[in-house]
Amino acid sequence: MRTLEVSLGERSYPIHIGSGLISDSALLERSVTAEQVLIVTNETVAPLYLERLEHGLRARNTHALVLPDGEQYKTLDTFSRIIDRLIEMRFHRDACVVALGGGVVGDVAGYAAASYQRGIAFVQVPTTLLAQVDSSVGGKTAVNHPSAKNMIGAFHQPVSVIIDTETLGTLPGRELAAGIAEIVKYGLIIDPELHGWLEANIERLTSLETQALSHAVHRSCEIKAAIVAEDEREHGKRALLNLGHTFGHALEALGGYGTWLHGEAVAIGTVLAARTSQRLQWLSADDCHRIENLLRRAGLPVRADGVDPDDMLEAMTMDKKAGRHGLKLVLLRAIGEAVVAAAPERDVLREVLRGDARA
């Protein structure tokens, strides 16, 4: 087991990374100190891992809530189901919510923990690659609005993140690729060496080679932990983590949160951000090709056929990062060098989006 720390003063917490951690009762008992525990999971993950986690927490007063699986269930109705269960079981303020699952489970369970009695403890046990390398770390919790992704939520840091890399062995190939999109993001925004490593080792990741996965998860968490420690509330550097997300969130909303997995939409959005950067003469055509090629090799989509550019532009105006000065995008000056910049004119973005449709 390897352990990192997200350094946030009194809100600091560990990220434990290793194999078989869901069955490590000693680690679980150290991480979940509350007497009352609600495990929130979904109908896909529960048959695989719920019993093991419950056994590891057998010394606690543990209950489970199994939710339907899918981004389309990341809603206020699902949030209310969690709150209803906490109230029904008479959970106190010193209780703990444990999120067992992917990003949807982590986000909605975390938002419920942030809201119940103005905030109770929360532990992340992510079971997808995307959740392990991204959404489980950093304290962003939310549900979607039908018109915009993650529009309703709160910052609420977990007290611990427990990453069991064995869970990736049951992950469908499409979900695995979606997680790789977020790993690629880290290399593009801040770590060109990671990007080069991915180019040399992407097939090792897609074939679930243990050592490669462990390295990619650890390095991704290391990068995110450092950025979150520097900028917890996204007033500066943390915004770089949104590379590809403004385009991607718009795609997800237009698809009704059922067409694209989050990582797939981010992959397409990353290509669009790279092409926008190239259009502004910030990023070379060669680097743009490298980015697109790596995402293709990971099994990810790189274009969104049939999406109307004007619909995309309209959906992008609902992005959380838009303010009174207009829309901002994370763009690239080079592989490993990202910047937050004012979005170019709509005609430029429309040209990039239309170019994507013709690709």
Image (cartoon, grey):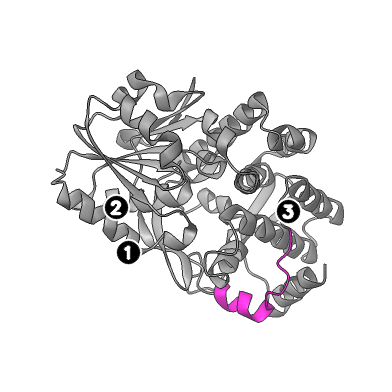
Label 3 Cα neighbours within 10 Å, binned few <14 / some 14-19 / many ≥20: some
- Does the CB distance between marks 1 and 3 fall below 8 Å? no
Side (left or right) of 156 relative to 246 = left
Three-letter amino acid code at the position of disc 1: Asp
Q: Secondary structure at mark 1?
A: helix
The stretch drawn in magenta includes residue 266: no
Q: Which residues are magenta?
A: 302-316
Q: Earlier in the sequence, mark 1 or mark 3?
A: 1
Three-letter amino acid code at the position of disc 3: Arg
Q: Quadrant of residue 281?
A: bottom right
Q: Position of residue 168 (x, y in %)?
A: 56, 35
> Which residue is tagged 3?
333
> Which residue is tagged 1?
77
Q: Earlier in the sequence, mark 2 or mark 3?
A: 2
Q: Position of residue 192 (x, y in %)?
A: 72, 39
**Residue toward you, 77 or 316:** 77
Q: Is residue 6 visible?
A: no
Three-letter amino acid code at the position of disc 2: Ala
What residue is rendered at 53% in x and 28% in y?
166
Q: Quadrant of residue 220?
A: top right
- Whole-number angstrom distance, CA of label 2 to CA of label 1: 11 Å
- Whole-number angstrom distance, CA of label 1 to CA of label 3: 42 Å
